[in-house]
Image (cartoon, helix red, strand yellow):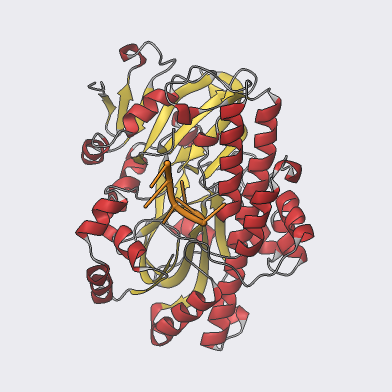
DNA sequence: ATGTGC
């Protein structure tokens, strides 16, 4: 079946609902022409159309320029559902609940760091376990875990693993309202306890970067970002705990008579928000999100320790302050203007970043005047970005932007195309030092198996949903 | 993504 795609703006494409009776609304994808031609090569546009058939969808089913094939819903997708008449779907959040990004700024220049770069990366590699099934150095018990699930970053502040400033710069202040540990299974708990403070595998990484260029000096200053300074970017989520929560609820929904029948793909399994099972999933999903915030925060704590040990500098000279920590796999209750009316919706962002401009009450106090930072990891050989939301994100995409470069080659295709040794030597030639838990992941994560992040951010900027603040290039990489 | 799958 040929999917009908109409270009309706410089960076905007429409998949009209008229082409399939089951679609309740249009699909909209933001991309430039070259990204759109590669998007058409996988089946993610069909997934955008599938999401458009779900009950209670408000506005279009949206795809970002980094869109690619995912479980049921596309990765790089945004979909909002009416709070009273709509659904929640675990596949619309993803298996890695609160997969997200944390960015740390520093007072160091690359010259300050260069002589010690390998040592710092090696020390981080030692202090932050990575790889599938990695176990951490933070020893927590069941009571701690319960507090983490219920309170998120507040637990880390109480334990001395987070500062007040860290909390001020974490989305939701690191604590999701409505988190309910009672609905997190013991299996999920048992997977989470040994894994807290670990990076995981796949596209999860920790990168030492240098700010190559600041495009928006005023906003960069407010974010603590300076050209030529070193930053650290962390990309990970809620590890096996969130994965188990997703698994548990997908299984329950598939067995429940309360789930939404008649969806075009079994992986779109959903429940009306009003139902008990939906509310239990929401409580568990928010608790897993709290675990994700704490997981990244413990890694921040380990990164600070690694720099202190290797650089022999006091904390105040290192200036390793949070810029922001955000979730790009999550569903949130928000109010949005739709056709001139205020509507309460559940916004699913799966591989999509909230990008609220100044003026939204959800912005953290520190970022009221600017809008919060939008952190966009690219690939390990090219670049990452910091953006900020524009008012256009509210009118176009329920206050959302892209979340990264987006895969272009499948993992198997990447493995056969890029041997690990070649990836390592090419990175070395660019002055990038890599430590990875497995060779397999080095091939799978080869830079050119990703779309060009420059084009992805140019597309969301061109579409008027976010503005580019700064471009960061990698110098040290830790990979699962 | 994931104690990686039939």
Q: Does residue A380 appear in the picture of this structure?
A: no
Q: Nearer the viewer, residue A452 or A391?
A: A452
**Rendered residue at 44%/15% (across/down):** A24
**Rendered residue at 47%/22% (across/down):** A59
Is residue A6 shown above or below A208? above
Percent across and percent down for residue A11 are 29, 34
Q: Quadrant of the N terminus of chain A?
A: top left
Is residue A412 shown above or below A138? above
Percent across and percent down for residue A143 are 79, 58
Percent across and percent down for residue A387 are 43, 51
Q: How many marks?
A: 0
Is residue A93 shown above or below A315? above
Percent across and percent down for residue A96 are 52, 48
Question: Does residue A44 appear to the left or right of A369 in the view shown?
Answer: left
**Rendered residue at 37%/24% (across/down):** A49
Q: Quadrant of the C terminus of chain A?
A: bottom left
Is residue A99 shown above or below A306? above
Q: Nearer the viewer, residue A300 or A342?
A: A300
**Rendered residue at 56%/20% (across/down):** A260
Could you say which quadrant of the image residue A21 lies in?
top left
Q: Nearer the viewer, residue A320 or A26?
A: A26
């Amino acid at each position: 079946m040929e999917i009908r795609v109409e270009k309706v703006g410089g960076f905007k494409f429409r998949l009209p609902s008229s082409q399939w009776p089951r679609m309740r609304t249009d699909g909209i994808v933001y991309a430039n022409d070259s990204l759109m031609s590669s998007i058409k090569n996988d089946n993610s546009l069909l997934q955008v159309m599938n999401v458009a058939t779900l009950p209670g969808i408000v506005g279009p089913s949206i795809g970002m320029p980094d869109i690619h094939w995912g479980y049921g819903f596309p990765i790089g997708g945004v979909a909002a559902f009416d709070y009273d008449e709509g659904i929640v779907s675990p596949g619309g959040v993803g298996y890695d609940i609160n997969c997200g990004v944390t960015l740390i700024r520093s007072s160091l220049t690359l010259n300050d760091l260069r002589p010690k770069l390998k040592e710092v990366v090696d020390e981080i590699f030692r202090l932050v376990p990575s790889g599938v099934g990695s176990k951490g150095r933070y020893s927590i018990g069941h009571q701690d875990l319960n507090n983490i699930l219920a309170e998120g970053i507040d637990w880390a502040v109480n334990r001395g693993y987070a500062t007040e400033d860290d909390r001020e710069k974490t989305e939701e202040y690191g604590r999701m309202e409505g988190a309910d540990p009672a609905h997190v299974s013991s299996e999920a708990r048992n997977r989470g306890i040994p894994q807290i403070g670990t990076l995981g595998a796949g596209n999860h990484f920790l990168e030492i970067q240098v700010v190559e260029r600041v495009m928006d000096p005023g906003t960069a200053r407010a974010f603590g970002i300076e050209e030529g300074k070193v930053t650290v970017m962390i990309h990970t989520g809620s590890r096996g705990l969130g994965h188990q929560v997703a698994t548990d609820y997908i299984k329950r929904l598939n067995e429940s008579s309360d789930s939404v029948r008649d969806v075009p793909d079994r992986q779109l399994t959903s429940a009306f928000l009003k139902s008990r099972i939906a509310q239990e999933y929401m409580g568990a999903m928010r608790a897993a999100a709290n675990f994700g915030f704490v997981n990244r925060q413990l890694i921040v704590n380990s990164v600070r320790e690694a720099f202190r040990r290797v650089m022999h500098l006091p904390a105040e000279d290192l200036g390793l302050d949070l810029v922001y920590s955000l979730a790009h796999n999550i569903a949130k209750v928000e109010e949005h203007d739709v056709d001139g009316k205020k509507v309460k919706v559940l916004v699913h962002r799966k591989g999509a970043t909230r990008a609220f401009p100044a003026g939204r009450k959800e912005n953290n106090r520190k970022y009221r005047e600017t809008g919060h930072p939008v952190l966009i990891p690219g690939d390990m050989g090219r670049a990452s970005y910091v953006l900020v939301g524009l008012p256009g994100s509210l009118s176009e995409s329920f206050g959302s932007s892209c979340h990264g470069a987006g895969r272009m080659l499948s993992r198997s295709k990447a493995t056969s195309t890029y041997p690990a040794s070649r990836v390592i030597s090419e990175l070395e030639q660019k002055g990038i030092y890599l430590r990875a838990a497995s060779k397999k992941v080095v091939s799978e994560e080869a830079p050119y198996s990703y779309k060009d992040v420059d084009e992805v951010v140019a597309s969301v900027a061109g579409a008027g949903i976010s503005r580019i603040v700064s471009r960061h290039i990698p110098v040290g990489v830790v990979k699962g």
